Image (cartoon, rainbow, N blue to C red):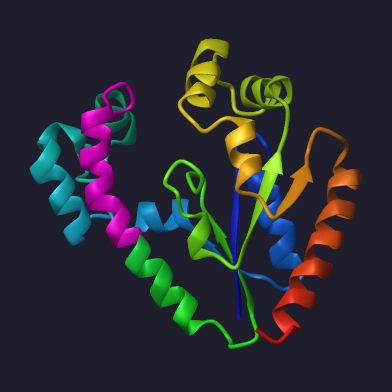
Amino acid sequence: MLKVGLTGGIGAGKSEVSRLLVERGAVLIDSDRIAREVVEPGTPGLAAVVEEFGPDILTAEGTLDRPALGALVFADDQRRAALNAIVHPLVGARAAELERAAPEDAVVVHDVPLLTENGLAPFYDLVVVVDASAETQLDRLVTLRGMTESDARARMSAQATREERRAVADLVVDNDGTHEALVEQVDAVWDELVRRAAAPR
């Protein structure tokens, strides 16, 4: 099994790269998806979040009100750390469970948005970083996701810098160009991942 950490800044195109890798045979473990699962209604995770932040972070239906919670934690490092202390261990445990269920010869890609920020690079056999210029990220966030420019810039500045991400990368996918160019790079990355998975270690 080859354990791959996949990361990239918001709007860099990491989700598209993970989709292309799955098409080629990777087993994907998506941290964002798991983070949503562990705070679904009825979970110990949601109960712990409500205990920490109060019932106002629930919708009328009893689900997590993400915008309300985001407003509390986005601008407050201590509150964000409190949320992370609840959610991160649950995500880690579920990711490990999914990894154990993967075939022995699998290329397992962990899609981890905050891999760099949380110092997780050493936990993977190698790290793939999807990279794009700040201008490209901003354009995608405003054009494709409908964010205001100020919101987009705030999200970008809350993450690691391009230089910090590239410093932990074993392989870099440059996603400033066309989709065709991206596919070519993903093909090359996949060939390298398969080669490394087959190599004796």
With respect to residue 79, does 24 lie above or below? below
Q: Place residue 192 in its image quadrant.
A: bottom right
Point 14% across, 31% down: residue: 56
Q: Is residue 42 left or right of residue 87?
A: left
Q: Is residue 70 above or below residue 83?
A: above
Q: Nearer the viewer, residue 184 or 161?
A: 161
User: Magenta stretch containing residue 53, yes or no?
Assistant: no
Residue 27 picture location, percent across and down: 61, 72
Q: Quadrant of the N terminus?
A: bottom right
Q: Is residue 87 above or below residue 126?
A: above
196 lies above or below 120: below
Query: Residue at 84% of width from left, 47% of height from top?
Result: 182
For the C terminus, which image quadrant?
bottom right
Give the image location of residue 190, x and y in percent: 79, 66
Residue 165 in view in this figure: yes
Does the magenta segment cover residue 81? yes
Which residue is pictured at 67% across the width and 71% down the height?
26
Query: Is residue 42 visible to the viewer in this orientation of the structure?
Result: no
Q: Give the image location of residue 55, x and y in percent.
A: 11, 37
The x and y percentages for residue 39 are 27, 53
How many numbered dots are placed on residues in this image? 0
What are the residue bounds of the magenta stretch?
A: 73-91
Residue drawn where x is 28% and y is 45% of the image: 84
Q: Is residue 177 left or right of residue 66?
A: right
Specify the quadrant of the image occupied by residue 73.
top left
195 displayed left or right of 85: right
